[in-house]
Amino acid sequence: MAQVRYVSASRVYGKNAPPAVDALDLEIRDGEFMVLVGPSGSGKTTALRMLAGLEPLDAGRVEIGERDVTFVPPKDRDIAMVFQNYALYPQKTVAQNMGFALKMQGVPKDERDRRVREAARLLDLDDQMLDRKPRQLSGGQRQRVAMGRAIVREPRVFLMDEPLSNLDAKLRVQTRSQIAELQRRLGITTVYVTHDQVEAMTMGHRVAVLARGKLQQCATPRELYDNPVNQFVAGFIGSPAMNLQTVPLTDGGARLAGTVLPLPAAVRTAASQAGLGELVAGIRPEHLHLANGSGELAGEVLLVEDLGADALLHVRLAGDADPVVARTEGRTPPAPGQQVTFHVQPDDIFAFHPVTGARLAG
Amino acid sequence: MTVIEDLAPPPKVEVRPRGVSRRERWQRRLPLLPALIYTIVVTQIPFLVTLYYSFQSYFWNTTAPAHFNGVSNYKTVFTTPAFRSALWRSVVMTAAAVIIAMILGVALAVLLDRKFFGRGVVRTLLITPFLIMPAAAALVWAGPMLDPNFGLLNYLLAPFGVHHVAWLSTHALGSVIVVMIWQWTPFMTLIVLAGLQSQPPDVLEAAKVDGAGAFATFRELTLPHLRPYIELGILLGSIYLVNVFDQVRLMTNGGPGTATTNLPFYLYQQVNYAFDIGGAAATGVVTVILTIIVATFALRMFARVFRFEEAV
Amino acid sequence: MTAVPLRALRAREPGSRRLREVSGKVGWTVLAWVVAIAFFLPVLWMVLTAFKPESAAETWPPRFTFSPTLAEFRLVFSGWGPYVTHSVIATIGSTILVLLLGVPAAYALSVHPVGRWRDGLFFFISTKMLPIVAAIGPLYVIALKTHLLDSIWVLIILYTAMNLPLAIWMIRSFMLEVPSELLEAAELDGAGRIREITGVILPVISPGLVSTALICVIFAWNELFLALNLTVTNAATMPMYLISSVPQEGLYIAHLSAAATVASVPVIIVGWIAQRSLVRGLAMGAIK
């Protein structure tokens, strides 16, 4: 039973380097599945390692279950970690790998065996496999052993550092749901690091988006998608990424591709209060609706990516704007070279400050 | 006279793809041949000649030609206590030096396997004994270091109640072994250090998270990881130290009495002082046979190292 | 995300823990230095003694302060000429020969391995296990009959055989490290066997070759047993010069130290400069 708290936690590697993790404030509830997501260099792994005790803090503190663990060594934090490359002990068998932490705790051998078997069953690792060495296992099996090693401990917090990144695409999707399911069943607080926003969206109860060491937004997947607080989160969450274009402001809207996109009144007010002459408009690909010639945005199809269920259109809009991506139904996509028009709901347009990237209230 | 026949055939993992043509096979063999022929000629022929002379009576300081004298050279070998004691001394010297050097090597490698002030300099100082010429090491130890009248060691030990000990007379074998250890500990340190540094850091982190302290991590994870490195160090150390000659010749000349006469020095004496080629050859043949027996075990160890290599 | 200055929030460790950590670190460093200096002490003492006048070398208590002199070094340099020449020729000659024989052999045992590469490799290693001393009598006779006794060739030939197994073993491991994609790319580009070795493999493994050569140089330069038994004057090497610097009577410790220093310094300096590749070479040759 443990919640986790980062309080202004910072980590600086070099004297003059920017902080790898910059005054992180984050609260993870008991039993919650929290995903830390961000591009490489965003500090997500560093933040996880700070929680594990593998990385010292330069400022702030970390708490596990109300207790300040900033200076507590990893072994006394009652955590279990799944490493990106699994970090299995190569000279030990699968069973010894999974039972190692218990052995270190002085748990008697019978009890150890029982719990290892239990965890193995939970993960569909059969008994013969328990006597093998890690190098005799496939990538997927190793991943499960690494999970098993964490589960056997029954720790207060699971830490997972990109545990799926070494699996092939199909297995990754499969394992993704298994991990989420397992976590729900065990109810153990979990902090999960990934660079893959799809993983973040599908697994996390809440997702914390990090960039350049700073927390951008922490919210449920739905909230991140519907209400990104800034341009970075808007661009990072969602696949394919949101179309973002810097557009000049006009009366009543923003000028794009030779036409005026209507903007909600709140956005217009916010923009004029900030004294902006232009802003960054964002439209998700799925919000560009094909409209047989009657849409307000016109352009020429450059490329069609047919994904089966739906198709992605790369379209050069009229005027000199950058190409945009639109998601459309897969059956009858337009052909490259064809002229198309799109319709957009005003509510589906996000607006951001062109300099700070902050969301302009809408 | 090679040892390969004795080897248990290792599991046949055929590296060569099937259906390699005859031409291709010769193309593959060709680059190996010069080294193979060279090694056979230079290392095997002398041993065949040794076998021949071991049945001859031949003293190279006389003009009398060599003549066949049956197994009498071998009789002498087995009836001379000198041979047996030299053999035993070789075993003791090699085993003591290799084992102690390895224990020290592991300790020093652990000491060096972390960042501290002047690590590069410390490592440089440590490897120097391995680089120094063994003859120079022997002479420097025998004179400036261990001399009873002006040696540095007696001076350094004086505060502990040691006064003008004539190390090479009273502790001859120990002194020679100490010099061997001094020269080979750096080698062991280097090999073990390489092993330590090849241990993946995330495994050590996993151990930390799993609650293992420094000692448990070393015993449970690091030592098994180091095993092939330790085996290799012991093997190479044994190969070189069993042949140790310079220190014996230059520090004690085999003495006092025969206290430090090991097999190489004994053979050297037979050839250079007794001029007894036949006797030395018989001693050599017996030595080689014993070596083959020991080496068979050693080669098994090599075979394990190779299995390790393939499994990684 | 309020911008609080980092220093204000600087995590404060409990004092006792920090103290323990710092003192542990200092203790570790001190221990490492003490051990290193202990191991280096005989070498240091050798060099110091080499700069002493003979009268200051054999004193009790040992003298640490003295007016340094180069007299003994001058004496060494006046007499070492032929010895050092022989040593250089034997060392470099045998090392070149080792590489010329070893590179193709290692290639045949790794990149495009011959059928029974394992047996081949074991054969080379096993020759290393046969004590050369066992054959010293017959070797003497063979050298005598082939008129190689007391010639530099006998040393070159035997040092090559002595170092070849270890060299093949090390070079082979370096060759195994060459990515197979690189070799396949070369093959697709139409490179034959020779070009594959000279154009692709050798440039990649050249650091490994250097460390292999260094090991050979160290062992050849330092070798005494064969030189002592098979040469007299025409091919006597540095270790033998060292022995000759020990007279039957009179004070000789300073002179001996100077000779020992001069004899050891080339290999020590080469080893120091190349220590990184040496470590790598030993360990790589060892395991991988």
Image: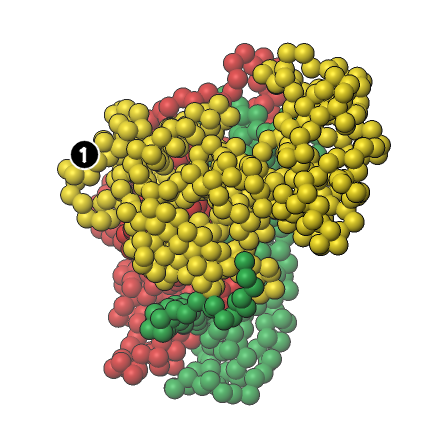
Chain colours: A yellow, B red, C green
**Residue at 68% from the left image edge and 27% from the top image edge:** A288
Image position of C254 (left or right of B253): right
Camera-side residue of A178 and A72: A178
- Reply above or below: B58 against B93: above
Kindly tell me whether residue A315 is visible in this rendering: yes
Q: Quadrant of the C terminus of chain B?
A: top left
Q: Quadrant of the N terminus of chain B?
A: top left
Camera-side residue of A208 and C104: A208
**Residue at 64% from the left image edge and 28% from the top image edge:** A287
Mark 1, other Cα within 10 Å: few <14 / some 14–19 / many ≥20: few
Q: Which type of secondary structure does the marked residue at label 1 adopt?
A: helix
Kindly tell me whether residue B41 is visible in this rendering: no
Quarter of the view holding residue A299? top right
What chain does badge 1 belong to? A
- Reply above or below: C72 against C222: below
Quarter of the view holding residue A134? top left
Camera-side residue of C96 and A41: A41
Q: Position of residue C202 (x, y in %)?
A: 65, 38
Camera-side residue of C160 and B236: B236
- Reply above or below: A234 against B102: above
**Residue at 55% from the left image edge and 62% from the top image edge:** C2
Q: Position of residue A50 (x, y in %)?
A: 43, 54
Quarter of the view holding residue B269? bottom left
Q: Position of residue A173 (x, y in %)?
A: 46, 26
**Residue at 25% from the left image edge and 25% from the top image edge:** A127
Image position of B223 (left or right of C4): left
Residue type at numbered disc 1: Arg
Q: For mark 1, what is the residue? A: A114
